[in-house]
Amino acid sequence: MTWVRGLYLLFALLVFPIILLLFAQWPLRDLVQAGSRLANDMGQLSFGLYMATAITAASWAGIHLACHLPGLHHAKAGEGAQTGWRTWAVFLCVAPWALFILLTYRDPVLQSLQQIERFPDTGHPGFFLMRVAVMWMALLVLAHAVWALLSPLWTKRGTP
């Protein structure tokens, strides 16, 4: 699925602002004596969005430490890998957790979005995106679990 790879690549580009912002906080603090807390907040925000996507991207690619079960990632699907009970077991562990996060965290995220919530310690804008990143991660994890479960059916029918 090319669009999934493109989406992961787009979020992978966040590594550059993470490096730049977290490196810049020291010169900003020591030399400029201004802006270091903002650089730190924006670096943390970029890292949160990056990691929310990277966890599922690693599982999709089959390189995540906890996801080396055959048939559970994009690279092995359709190659005759064992799917069966292992795929169901992972689905039954992951899907309820992801649904729980999506349902219980929905109202706090919506409230945060409505208020355009700021970082509590510094008052800088953008903290609402950290809350959105939690929902994003749960949505990606759920989508990956559903895909892993249904992809053998799509492969048998000839539908990618």
Image (tube, grey):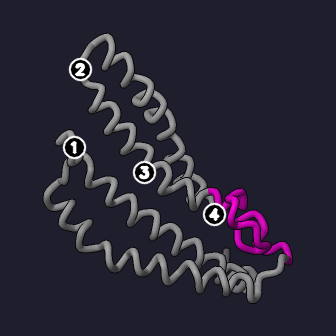
Residue 143 lies left or right of residue 38; in this view the side is: right
Instruction: Work out how far the residue at label 3 is from the one at label 1, CA to CA, in angstroms.
Output: 19 Å
> How crowded is the residue under tag 1: few (<14 C-alpha within 10 Å), some, or many (20+)?
few
Q: Nearer the viewer, mark 4 or mark 1?
A: 1
Q: Residue at x 47, y 76 (%)?
A: 98
The answer to which of marks 3 and 4 sits earlier in the sequence is 4
Residue that carries the numbered disc 2 in the rendered image: 34
Q: Is residue 74 magenta?
A: yes
The answer to which of marks 3 and 2 sits earlier in the sequence is 2
Q: Which residues are magenta?
A: 58-80
The answer to which of marks 2 and 4 sits earlier in the sequence is 4
Q: Nearer the viewer, mark 2 or mark 4?
A: 2
Instruction: Work out how far the residue at label 2 is from the one at label 1, CA to CA, in angstroms.
Output: 16 Å
158 or 45, which lies in front? 45
Residue that carries the numbered disc 4 in the rendered image: 1
Can you give x and y, in whole percent of width and height, for residue 133 in the image?
39, 58
> How crowded is the residue under tag 4: few (<14 C-alpha within 10 Å), some, or many (20+)?
few
Instruction: Work out how far the residue at label 4 is from the one at label 1, CA to CA, in angstroms.
Output: 41 Å
Residue that carries the numbered disc 1 in the rendered image: 121
Residue farthest to the top, as pictured: 31
Q: Amino acid at mark 4?
A: Met
52 or 11, which lies in front? 52
Q: Residue at x 43, y 80 (%)?
A: 99
Q: Is residue 45 magenta?
A: no
**Relative to 75, does residue 33 appear above or below in the rendering?**
above
